[in-house]
Image: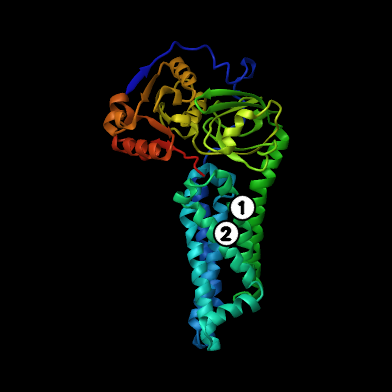
Amino acid sequence: MSTVVTAPPAAGHDRATVPRADRPSRRRRMPAKPRPRIVDAMGAVAGLGLGVVVALGVNAESAGSLRAPGGWLTAGGRVTGLVAMYLMIIVVLLVARIPGLERAVGMDRLVGWHRKLGPWPLYLITAHAALITVGYAHAAHDGVLHQLGQLLWTYPGILASAVGFVLLIVAGVTSYKKARRRMAYETWWSVHLYTYLALFLSFSHQIGTGASFVGHPATVLFWKSLFWGTAAVVLACRILLPLWRSLRHQVKVVGVTPAGPGMVSVLLEGRRLDRLPIAGGQFLQWRFLKPGMWWQAHPYSLSAAPSRRHLRITVKALGDHSARLLSLEPGTRVAIEGPYGAFTADQRSTDRVLLVGAGVGTTPIRALLQELPEGVDVVAVLRGSTAGELALREEIIRDVARRGGQVHELVGPREHVDLSSAGLLRLVPDMPHRDVFVCGPDGFTRAITAAAAGAGVPEAQVHHETFDF
């Protein structure tokens, strides 16, 4: 069922968002503008690096080594091992939270690339182990199983690399969607931490004993530079920058209030938050420093535009961590990582915007709405099985009404709600001429983006970001 909701314009923003004297400031530091050329440059560097890796591996072989028994198999094993090691480094860097790359692409797309590329190193490691074992068995005129035992128990670092391989397999299996849905976020997060240990264990043996490295100092320097460079990037982006921002801004909880069925809003206060480069629509990783919660960071979007002293998140209880937010006490300290995301007002290319949110996905929609310039024509579409599921409904209605726009509520069972191109065009006839911002469950987002394409909205004017990491 579709309902058009209007409300008299409200004076200023909702009092529940931030105190009246603490409105968003025009002097606030904003996120850097996305630079798509960064993606092209990094892609070119990654491709060049792959070429260098293959070249170094091939250069280490000789005509004599290839003609020896099992020579081609062993050479293939060495090259697949090197490529696997390189791809694992790329997989790690994709989710290293590199600010320029993340801002240009969006964390959801980087995670998507991470997941698509992730299985290939595992395939190549498997090929590496199989080819090396069979090649060595041919060279020693030995059985494959006996040779495998010899490698594991007598060659330096091989047993450790086998343990690392098992850890990589576990991390990979738990990342598949079917397995991921059956696991709590906390469990998946803990398992995934072992990826770093697995990377070290799986490949450290190659530099010390691999034929591509022994007697090839330039190759050793290249790989050590890759490893230490990657470690430095991860350390800087995942640990040092978040630590600096957490210490600088001193964020703490100042209020916790119910925001609907199974939802809670957390109001946070900090120092000089106007210097934190964040915009409505983005999210941070939040680590609440209290017993039972301090050891995990979870991604939650802002549900109100940031201000000089305050931030706000609105969360639906979907796991152990989110369910505990209601028990937070004022004064609880919070460590932050971020901000992240490209779901921001500066992505639009027109002065007409359609905001589409479902359930708790309306929370970043509300924060983004506050960031839009006053002259932008706004229409909002809110979707929920019940009206109570429309997070921050009243705030969105008031903000849109103040701009003279409309809010359409699509409430009811799925079979009663038309999310097709024709259905959306009936609600918003000029939809093809608007920038469309969509946030909600993955299935809902896919349906709306497909409907927008069918309605004639250019791909560049459809903006969405998922938070299922």
Q: Which label sits in the foreground, 1 or 2?
A: 1
Residue at the image point whose x is 53% and y is 65% from the top: 84
> Which residue in the structure is indicated by mark 1?
193
- Find residue 323 and report its horizontal and vertical position in percent: 57, 33
Q: Secondary structure at mark 2?
A: helix
Q: Secondary structure at mark 1?
A: helix
Residue at the image point whose x is 61% and y is 56% from the top: 194
Mark 1 to mark 2 CA distance (whole Å): 15 Å
- Find residue 68 and report its horizontal and vertical position in percent: 52, 88
Quarter of the rendering containing residue 299: top right
Tell me if residue 13 can be seen. Answer: yes
**Protein image colouring:** rainbow
Q: Is 237 rendered above or below residue 389?
A: below
Q: Name the disc covering residue 174, or none.
A: none
Disc 2 crowd, CA 10 A, few/some/many (<14, 14-19, 20+): some
> Which residue in the structure is indicated by mark 2?
89
Q: Nearer the viewer, residue 373 or 16?
A: 16
Image side of residue 232 versus residue 183, left or right: right
Q: Nearer the viewer, residue 437 or 423?
A: 423
- Find residue 281 and report its horizontal and vertical position in percent: 51, 32
Image side of residue 7 versus residue 203, left or right: left
Residue at the image point whose x is 50% and y is 84% from the top: 70
Q: Nearer the viewer, residue 76 or 394?
A: 394
Q: In the image, what residue type sits under mark 1?
A: Leu
